[in-house]
Amino acid sequence: MAEIEQKIDKNAKIAVLCGGMSSEAEVSRRSGKGCYDALQRLGYNNSELVEVDENIASKLKEGKYDYAYNALHGKYGEDGCIQGILEILKIPYTGCGVMSSAICMNKEYTKRILSTCKDIPLAKSAFVRKGEDFEALTADLKFPVITKPVSEGSSFGMTKVNTRKELKSAYEEAIKYNDDVLIEEFIDGFFVTVGVLEHDGENFATEILEIRPKNEWYDFEAKYTQGMSEFILPARLSEELTKRTKEIAVKAHEKTGCRGVSRVDFMISNDGIPYVIEINTSPGMTVTSDLPAQSAVMGINYDNLVQIILNGAGLNK
């Protein structure tokens, strides 16, 4: 891709929001530092790293920022909360808005919206609210299954359950993070992920990244421990499956109201069906994160990726 046009004034004061109050705070700080350094290299010398805490509204108001670059992950940063504060303060920000952030942070409601599209494959699942009979609600599911908190990232609280007798302890682990739990049939296959970006008003998919964890599945250790996963980029998919997966990613992004940037995760079954697992509305931007690697293969280096995402902030001003 050619050099990306800088659509935001170089003198703009930009708050790079990072840290926060979620279990992903440390990952967010690493993302934020990477984005801040890129903005400095791009000439946005009035950008500042801003640690998000319960006083963030005051910090933003006192800082008189022109734009906010959202490098937060997880609760309060990726679920519509920080987006709502920014809307009230009338500060344009990068990435998805209040509604799509709230929807996609909740894996169950994401699935409910995507289920209205007949051509978006989804794994069979059961949604269990705290206090409900998880045994009865999962009676029709085939094992193994994955238990996951509906509104958590980085595989926190997730467990692969091979037999029904293991389900209770896995469910109890999940509700440590959220009151609501999604229990989903395990797709026998492999994990891929694809970014969706917006440029000149058009959404497009990045290259597809195939991830082969050394653990039984793509858990927290496999995600964040160097050498615990094999990354294959571009993914070893047929031309037809590559095209279909990218089309589904863009459609899922648009159907849930996402804008600017997202990352759609899939399990590709052994019979070649790309099942959408979840949509991340604030993808990681660390040096080892998926989105920068996917973009680099397309000729979009880290700084240009940051610029593309920043340009999106001007669209909601």
Image (spheres, grey):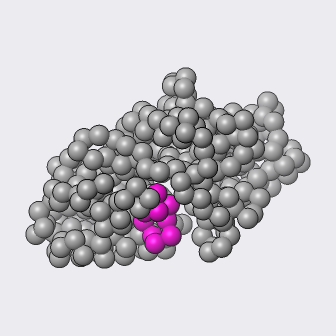
Decide which of 175, 141 is in the foreground and name it. Answer: 141
| Left or right of 86 on screen, residue 237 | right
Seen as rendered, the residue at the extreme front is 239
| Left or right of 88 on screen, residue 191 | right
| Left or right of 153 on screen, residue 134 | right
Residue occupying image coordinates x 62% and y 57%? 211
Q: Position of residue 273 (x, y in %)?
A: 65, 35
Q: Is residue 291 visible?
A: no
Q: Does the magenta portion include 11?
A: no
Decide which of 40, 22 is in the foreground and name it. Answer: 40
Residue occupying image coordinates x 18% and y 57%? 5
Residue occupying image coordinates x 31% and y 46%? 198
Decide which of 68, 243 is in the foreground and name it. Answer: 243
Q: Position of residue 16 (x, y in %)?
A: 29, 68
Residue occupying image coordinates x 53% and y 54%? 234
Q: How many marks?
A: 0
Compared with residue 289, is residue 107 higher up or lower down, i.e. above or below?
A: above
Q: Quadrant of the N terminus?
A: bottom left
- Segment colored magenta: 285-294
Q: Quadrant of residue 308?
A: bottom left
Q: Is residue 218 visible?
A: yes
Decide which of 99, 249 is in the foreground and name it. Answer: 249
Q: Position of residue 203 (x, y in %)?
A: 34, 41
Q: Position of residue 146 (x, y in %)?
A: 72, 48
